[in-house]
Amino acid sequence: MTIIYKVQGESSPSSTKSVISSISSKNIIAFSVLEELEAGSQIFVCDLISPWQLHNITSSKKVLRALEWNSNGEFLLAVYNNGNIEIWSADKVLNSWHLQYKANIPGEDIITGKFFHNGKSIYFHSQKKDLPTYADKFERLEHRPTVEHFGSAPAEGVVIITASGLVGSFIIPNSKYSDSLCPAVELKPVTQSLGLSRFYISLCSMSHCPNGHLNVAVNYSCRPKIIYCFKVGINLDNDNLFIKCEALPSIFLMLQITSKFHKLVGSLRIRKTFCILDIIR
């Protein structure tokens, strides 16, 4: 791997900084840097072609937890520790953004969120890299949408997970973008407990499955040696969402029990059926 370019602020690097970033399919990167909890959060965007031109989307006194783009790069999801959920869209230019939709789960600390999968998935076939046309180098994967309307049309929506073990979801209305002067549309999430017992979640990761479900891996702060896995299915019936959570086999870490173990686990990522732990020593 080769670093093509690097963007760094004028201030000196600090180990206390928390960086959250996400790159869209349109090569637009959204990021936020948190240095102090009292300072709040700011979301910036820039084009990878000209990363020196930064644009501020919004500022909040609450702590930002996650940023996520939808599949076509038109919606940007931002979730906060006070239960706020925001979906932003650009007003045709990169330096003008509009809060399109918002939702709230009172009293909950949202730690991660994802858009529904639309059922379209392609991958690069390494054995066909020498073919003359780019279209022949990519193949389509069989993938079901997370939620389907009548006639198997994919639905646009969001699924989130809170630190207390709640799964929330809502559908984005299938309508044209509203004018930037119009207020944001407030949506009502549907919630369901992830497991039979609810504990504080310190780490969490979600991944879409080809069958339309989501694989979820969590690590509870009270049980740091176990990675709990779940399968989450979201169904639409008469315009009502129903969330079904099913427990999967857990992963037991063969590490020595220490009181500081929870500080050693840096991040948790799950890709389809694979769970990856990053350990920071």
Image: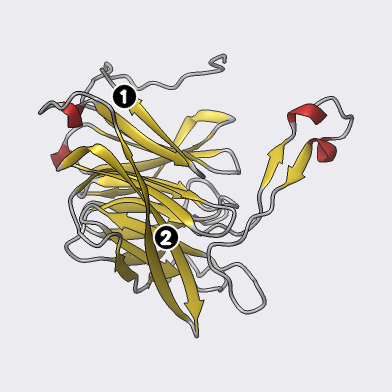
Percent across and percent down for residue 18 are 27, 32
Image quadrant for the N terminus? Answer: top right
Q: Would residue 271 be visible to someone looking at this image?
A: yes
Q: Is residue 141 above or below residue 119?
A: above
Q: Residues within 10 Å of mark 1 (few under 14, many from 20)?
A: few
Residue denoted by label 2: 232
- Residue 127 relative to residue 236: left or right: right
Instruction: Say which residue appears at 37% left-offset and 72% top-offset.
Output: 187
Residue denoted by label 1: 279
Q: Amino acid at mark 1?
A: Ile
Q: Which quadrant holds residue 151?
A: bottom right
Percent across and percent down for residue 178 are 50, 70
Instruction: Say which residue appears at 33% left-offset and 33% top-offset.
Output: 267
Instruction: Say which residue appears at 47% left-offset and 55% top-offset.
Output: 214
Q: Nearer the viewer, residue 230 or 280?
A: 230
The answer to which of marks 2 and 1 sits earlier in the sequence is: 2
Percent across and percent down for residue 10 are 32, 19
Query: Element type at marker 2?
Result: strand
Q: Amino acid at mark 2?
A: Val
Q: Residues within 10 Å of mark 2 (few under 14, many from 20)?
A: many
Image quadrant for the C terminus? Answer: top left
Instruction: Say which residue appears at 48% left-offset and 72% top-offset.
Output: 235
